[in-house]
Amino acid sequence: MSRPRLLLLVLIVLAIAAFFVFDLDRFLSVDFFKARQTAAEAWRDAHPWLATAAYFTAYVLVTGLSLPGAVVMTLIGGALFGLVWGSLVISFASSIGATLAFLVARFLLRDWVQNRFGERLQAVNEGIAREGGFYLFTLRLVPLFPFFLINLTLGLTPIRAWTFYWVSQLGMLPGTLLYVNAGTRLARIDSLQGILSPGLLLSFALLGLFPLIAHKAVALAKARRVYAGHARPRRFDRNLVVIGAGSAGLVASYIATAVRARVTLVEKDRMGGDCLNTGCVPSKALIRTAKLLSRMRRAGEFGIRKVHADFEFAEVMARVRRVVETVAPHDSEERYTALGVDVIRGEARLLSPWEVEISRPDGSRKVISTRSIVIATGARPFIPPIPGIEKVDCLTSDNLWALRELPRRLVVLGGGPIGTELTQAFARLGARVTQVERLPRILIREDPEVSDLVTERFRAEGIEVLVGHQARRFLIEDGERILVAEHEGEERRIPFDAVLVAVGRTANLRGYGLEELGIPVDRTIETNAFLQTLYPNIYAAGDVAGPYQFTHTAAHQAWYAAVNALFAPFKRFRADYSLIPWATFVDPEVARVGLNEQEARAREIPYEVTRYDIDDLDRAIADGEAQGFVKVLTVPGKDRVLGVTLVGEHAGDLLAEWVLAMRHDIGLNRILGTIHIYPTLAEANKYVAGQWKKAHAPEGLLRWLERFHRWRRGGA
């Protein structure tokens, strides 16, 4: 703690201690004032301005130091100065005193609290930033709630001091008037309890309900304004219509039918969306074959002299298709129909906030009215506007599965997860792959050491990794395709047979009637914390809503969207993004949850790093996979986990223990105390906890134990 902060803290502690040591609280009682009321009124009459100033100063000090007695002082103010003048003086004194307490808490503790608990307080901070004034106003209208707690607690949040002051003054005024008015009748009151009559308590309760009722009324008025010009049906065909049968749409539909709502799911293409048909499932099937080939080439490491793999690329892709077909029944129309979902094939378009028109493949049209709508239309690969790209028939994660001949020379544009996974897979299948990334390294969202390890592995496998290269244009010269890329001001020509574009995905926003309804869309559909769009009964989930484009986060969002759509306004839930895990399925795998080092530094969150290298792990050595590491970020000096990065065999599977630990606040001590089977890769999680424990060993206690054991051996 800095010297000014320490000095201020000492002064405050001394002042509070003096208040209680010298029993100054005896002056702040109804009995004390009533015994001297006549003399006090006489002094007030003789020195009105001095009496006002003295009372004002005393009130500011009591509230500024968060001392007990503000209620009694308010009553005394009513008795001494009357309703009008007393209310005016007390209104300013209480607001100034409260703001002083607020500023003291902010100066002394806010930075420490935010640095230590910033992750946990993220939702609170966002709520305060968005509606802090309203929350404060609601609390101020209920004087029975300890105001000193409000002052000190809000000082630790991002709310502006000026907002705190004027909202406090406005919010405390009704309660101040009630207490001051009661104080004007102080001669007839024998104790503080006498002021808390049932009528006064009821008044405070009604004051507390007023802002909530007003908030609901404002929300209703806004909704009516949004819906103006649209005729709401008197009855609805469905409780919910879901547009899109990818991960988000399937989960939303399943939840709706599970709670016996009537739901229609509309899909214009294939059930299962991108994940099943062109994303997660086929890519992992391809990666599995590529990994098998890689292990066969490493046969010598396992004591096998020679292994020969005879394969055709077309047969590999046929297996990928069989895997998709095997998984497809999980997401099929038949399964969801059996569950009770009304599945309709066709293109959906919003006609109004409550009406969806469905154009079927046979040309027929159907209009369905519904209370709520969930838009889960997913995303598609982004094709950058690079000159000449339209001439080279670029591949994407959508269409590459139709390949039956392996490209001899493949250029992969993009160093993110999709581009990186497919780069390694095609290289292992025999293509000569050049990966082109405009940023300084691949996997830019991971820590540099992760990018370096994967890049080193790629280059060892014969992959040419070109970072810091900006694709400028595509050419066709003498029948040969060429990518011209710029690196450090110089152009480089890269000949290729096929190019795979994997530079990101763009949300499917067009053709659904969003623009006609005025729903804000940019790169994604704009939603609030409850996943509502401009219209409160229309929700969005999955890739089309962002901010994450993972299958598991789409399913996660779908729960919130479906439950909110079905049960609002009776109950709503804010979407929780506090703990999102993900993995990149390169070899070695990269998995992460929570903060990594570059994020912690960018957000100025203090952290401590503990690392365990997997090359020391028995099972990894036995499996020939002794590479990678577990890196854990913790609160300095504590075992609470802020984030984990895993690199190694089955990293995505091993990460589950850390997701559970962070979700339920399980620290490294408890992970260390958990039995892990030997020999398994999961022991790496226990060993990194052991590394942390070793670094935090209680050296003083250990020295005493050393002396104790020496004494037990008979030593001096």
Image: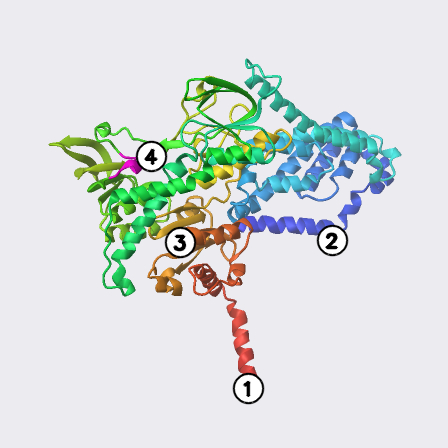
At label 4, the amino acid type is Asp
262 left or right of 63 in image: left
Classify residue 381 by image quadrant. Answer: top left
- Marks 3 and 2 sit apart, C-alpha to C-alpha, by 63 Å
Check the image and report above or below for 624 versus 43. below
Classify residue 179 by image quadrant. Answer: top right
- Residue 162 in sight here: no
Q: Which of disc 4 and disc 3 is earlier in sequence?
A: 4
User: Do the CB atoms of the residues marked 4 and 1 lie less than 8 Å apart?
Assistant: no
Residue displayed at 30% across by 49% down: 290
Front disc: 2 or 1? 1
How many marks the image carries: the answer is 4
Residue denoted by label 2: 21
Residue displayed at 67% across by 41% down: 148
User: Do the CB atoms of the residues marked 3 and 4 lie less than 8 Å apart?
Assistant: no
Question: Which span of residues is magenta-colored?
Answer: 395-404
Residue 613: percent from left, percent from top: 38, 60
Residue denoted by label 3: 650
